[in-house]
Amino acid sequence: MSMIPTATTNPLIVAKFGGTSVADYAAMCRSANIVITNPHTKIVLISACSGVTNLLVALANGISDITLRQQHLQQLTDTHQQILNQLQHPHTVSDAIYALFDDIASASAQAAIASSPQLTDKLVSHGELLSTYLFNQILVEMNTAAIRFDIRDVMRTDTQFGKAIPQPDLIRQLAQQYLVPLVDTQIAVSQGFIGRDEFGNTTTLGRGGSDYSAALIAEAVDATTLEIWTDVPGMYTTDPRITAAAKPIKEISFSEASEMANFGAKILHPSTLVPAIRHQIPVFIGSSIAPQQGGTWIKKTVEQAPLFRALALRGNQTMVTLTSLNMFQAYGFLAEVFRILAEHKISVDLITTSEVSVSLTLDQTDTGGGAPTLPLAAVEQLNQLCRVDIEQGLSLVALIGNHMSDSKGSAKHIFGALDAYNLRLICYGASPHNLCFLVNEADAKSVITTLHQQLLE
């Protein structure tokens, strides 16, 4: 297998580079070389430079202390100015970049008076708008035909600021009309993560949404491969920062990778694979720092499907327990609970029930970060129905594999290794590809290390 992925028939590769892959001038040059090396790479989507989104989110949340706000703005300026200073022809893009700096300064002053999800999306989008000017210019200076394209012209979403929902049919129509004709003779450099609603407002797809937007674009342009370039060479059996014994995974099925992404494998956004699965687009994950190391291929079918494949960890979990004696041998209780949750657009992740209670976890966070929680209005409505207990400071551990619920003795093997820990909200059997449970945040890494040692080493 070649180190840089290639496709066979009418190849069109969409490549996405994360924040660490465009962190500074050297990182951008490495990533540009990956793009140039493969002539089939026609569309490149990039994130904001590493650390920039966090600075922008802080500004968007409102910093009333002018000195502190100025420090954040200076950090942003310095990050991009250092790259600008190393360009051969910085004047080509400097005016556009300085104009964006001015926009950030005025929007952050506005946020200090009154913050809003709409203003947050507008502000946060500037990270990607800035990085694409610089990256495109680096490609041009490497004698490559490249054009910067504003992805908001095709990435149409609804108006749910902070975690906007894309509209694939409209995205496809616009991409075929405006983006595809550009890439016959040149590379289009564009942004991940951001979009636009029908009223022309900038939206974001939520934290980690760059991968998702890359997959949506790959689907929209009929790409033959989607590449995701990050700072690690593919997926591992668990996060190598938790245990040094984590092993690289050369290939993995869409089903397994979806579970890993959903349950916290940071290398992949949970929604990324949905468009890829719809159009059966193979996904390659590699390291922009060391592309020669290869990476992980995610495909519909793989040669090996082990019982235990990997472990994923997702922190910052919120568990909601709803208790009512009226639930005992009654019908309609759960329907009413979920009606209330749906009314407040609350997405539920895991769920377990007993005769008189139901426990559930809330789905991922939005652009603003922080643990998910129930809006006060939802709590008030639920309180009329049952007792509501909200617990935070939890982590979700997920064991990913194949046919686990069909394998005799596997549950004993798994839970026997964890008799020293308090496990909460165990979900097992609903999917043949995962077993998951909550633990106290303080125990999470120790649980992962123990399970990895027992099941995967």
Image (cartoon, rainbow, N blue to C red):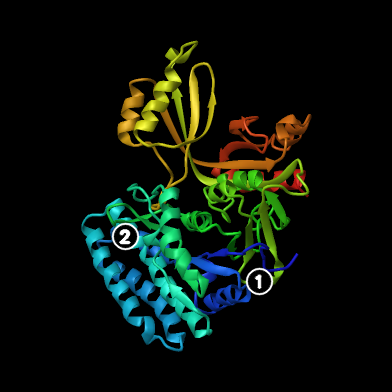
**Image coordinates for residue 228, horizontal then vertical, percent:** 58, 61
- Residue at label 2? 122
Q: Does dot 2 land on a helix, a strand or a loop?
A: helix
Quadrant that contains the N terminus? bottom right
Going 69% across and 50% down the picture, which residue do you hit? 252
In the figure, 34 relative to 255: above or below? Answer: below
- The mark nearer the N terminus, 2 or 1, is 2
> How many discs mark residues in the rendered view?
2
Going 32% across and 48% down the picture, which residue do you hit? 159
- Residue at label 1? 290
**Image coordinates for residue 449, horizontal then vertical, percent:** 69, 48
Instruction: Say left or right for 282 vs 335.
Output: right
The amino acid sitting under disc 2 is Lys
**Image coordinates for residue 206, horizontal then vertical, percent:** 42, 52
**Image coordinates for residue 123, horizontal then vertical, percent:** 32, 62
In the figure, 244 relative to 41: above or below? Answer: above
Classify residue 194 by image quadrant.
Answer: bottom left
Q: Is residue 193 visible?
A: no
In the figure, 89 relative to 13: above or below? Answer: below
Front position in the image: 286 or 417: 286
Q: Does dot 1 land on a helix, a strand or a loop?
A: loop
The amino acid sitting under disc 1 is Ala
Disc 2 vs disc 1: Cβ atoms closer than 8 Å?
A: no
